[in-house]
Amino acid sequence: MTDTDDVGTGVETGVDALAWRDRKRYWWPLGLLIPLSPFLSWLLVEHLHLGLFWATGAWILILVIPIVDVAVGADGHSPPDNVIAELQDDRYYRWCTYLFVPLQYGGLVFAAWCWSYAPMATGEKIALAMTVGVVAGVGINAAHELGHKNNRHERRLAKIVLAQSLYGHFYIEHNHGHHVKVATPRDPASARFGESFWIFLPRSAFGGLRSGWLIESARLRRQGSPVLSPRNSIVQAWSLSAALFGTLISVFEWQILPWLFLQALAGITFLEAANYFENYGLLRARREDGSFVKARPEDSWNSDHLVSNLFLYQLQRHSDHHANPRLRYQSLRSAPTAPQLPAGYAVMIVCAAVPPLWRRIMDHRVLDYYNGNIELLHSKATV
């Protein structure tokens, strides 16, 4: 299967391929500011002498990006169908994701050095762990982009990226579990209507781990291989994480271990927050025999906010991603027929953390989308 297989109809047609240009082309490297945030944190603390700047990565995510997102507004610019093949083959876009990997690990090593040797108070170490956690969370998103591709090199990079967050099973579960079961009661990563993020978080995290293990175990059994073997992708992922943490501890000693776990937990939380609102309350239509139809753009929340999409490799165009999972981030189109989030992901993460605020903002949107028919949405009643 090639990168352009299973590509659906775009939102722009009849546009001259020679005349169309990606206006965001040279803005995509902005996403590399996230893995650089541990170094930026140190520079700000060093020159401004305020420990709160150790949390610069978190401030970028929950303050800077939302403010700039509001100021800049929506994108409203999608590639037409007749340029998709050219976009898919343009290696410039791939290098924008490849470069994330060395910068991510450079920042992690630097943070480990700071935790071990820099004169930092406990609160400052926690703040730096939040910055590194943002890198880990966005790293899971980078792994999401890389792991969907047929290129073996990119899939290996995806596994390496996931090692920092201890979330290697995501590589299996997302591709072979979530994409198959999305917006159905069988998917642990599809949030139910009325379910708070803090209830969803452990359900999705542990449910995704269990689902990924069952999927990988079944694959190995079909091949006649033992489940606990080096061929198990999840065992490979755990081994990478163990090797990474073990190497860092051997160099910087055991005092960094709590901060390594804290940054991983923060990264997982940021990732699961995105999972929470990407399909909140949405349920795929059923056929007459009770089975679910193929996932459509209308089964995921779309967001076309420009700046947050630049930092997240257009993860917010999630509706097109589920309809056409082989499309690379630069080729994803906004989906005007899908339900629309009121803001970019950075804002929605903050809202998700406050359940009453979340329900006030989102519940009426879910009900309006289904014209008030609660039997059509994904709730506890459909489980």
Image (spheres, helix red, strand yellow):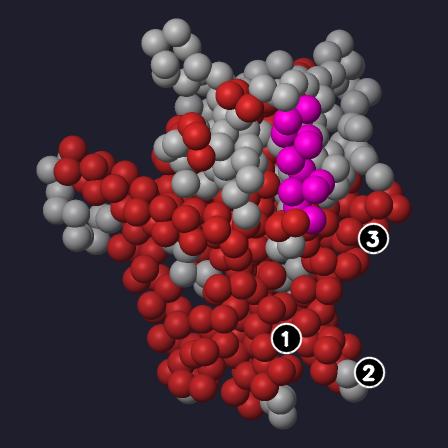
| Residue 210 rendering spot, x and y as whole percentages | 30, 47
Q: Is residue 359 above or below residue 367?
A: below
Q: Disc 3 to disc 1, how far (Cα)?
A: 21 Å
Q: Disc 3 to disc 2, how far (Cα)?
A: 22 Å
Residue at (34% x, 9% y) in the render: 289
Mark yes or no: residue 335 visible: no
| Residue 60 rendering spot, x and y as whole percentages | 73, 61
Residue at (44% x, 15% y) in the render: 286
Of 156 and 272, the residue lying toward us: 272
Residue type at numbered disc 3:
Ile
Label 3 belongs to which residue? 67
Label 1 belongs to which residue? 127
Contact, mark 3 vs mark 1 (Cβ under 8 Å): no
| Residue 363 rendering spot, x and y as whole percentages | 64, 35
Label 2 belongs to which residue? 48
Residue type at numbered disc 1:
Ala
Residue at (67% x, 38% y) in the render: 362
Mark toward the viewer: 1 or 2: 1
